[in-house]
Image: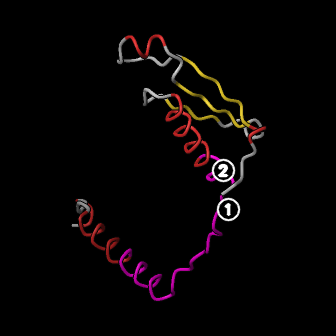
Amino acid sequence: MAKIKPGQLRIEYFKSSGPGGQHKNKKFTSVKITHSPTGLSAVGTEQRSQAQNKEMALERLNIKIDRLFRKKKKRIPVRMPGSVKEKILEYKKRRGKIKQLRQKVKNEEW
């Protein structure tokens, strides 16, 4: 996990929207945390508690930052074995012959 320094975070509190009545409309319970170096942000609005929303937002931000800095595995190119290539070519030849037999016979050939 990448370590985040508190000085790199910008925390904003705001009123959340949606159902919840008077408590949600009056209190600044929602939290938005922005990581300054990367510009990533996460929001927590589900709980009625500001502290719980802050924890949720921090967890989400940590997950986003981990994804950003995770090293991707090298792709290993895979070659098709020669026997498989031969089988594919045989199948194509058979299909071509079947398609030729499906064509209508012209009157000139009679």
Name the residue carrying label 2.
68
Residue shown at 60% from the left, 28% from the top:
32
Q: Tell me if mark 1 has few (under 14), some (14-19) or many (20+) residues whose alpha carbon lies within 10 angstroms of its own.
A: few
Disc sitting over residue 71 in the figure: 1
Residue shown at 32% from the left, 77% from the top:
94
Q: Tell me if mark 2 has few (under 14), some (14-19) or many (20+) residues whose alpha carbon lies within 10 angstroms of its own.
A: few
Side of 58 where 9 appears, left or right? right
Is 90 covered by the magenta stretch?
Answer: yes
Query: Which region shows up in magenta?
Result: 64-92
Q: Which percent across, then down, holds residue 84? A: 44, 83
Q: Pointers 2 and 1 in contact (CB under 8 A)?
A: no
Kindly identify the amino acid type of the residue bearing the numbered disc 1: Lys
Q: In which quarter of the view is residue 33 placed?
A: top right
Disc sitting over residue 62 in the figure: none
Q: Which percent across, then down, holds residue 1? A: 65, 58
Kindly identify the amino acid type of the residue bearing the numbered disc 2: Leu
Residue shown at 59% from the left, 41% from the top:
58
Q: What is the distance, in whole Å, between disc 2 and disc 1 at their CAs?
A: 9 Å
44 or 74: nearer the viewer: 44
28 or 93: nearer the viewer: 28
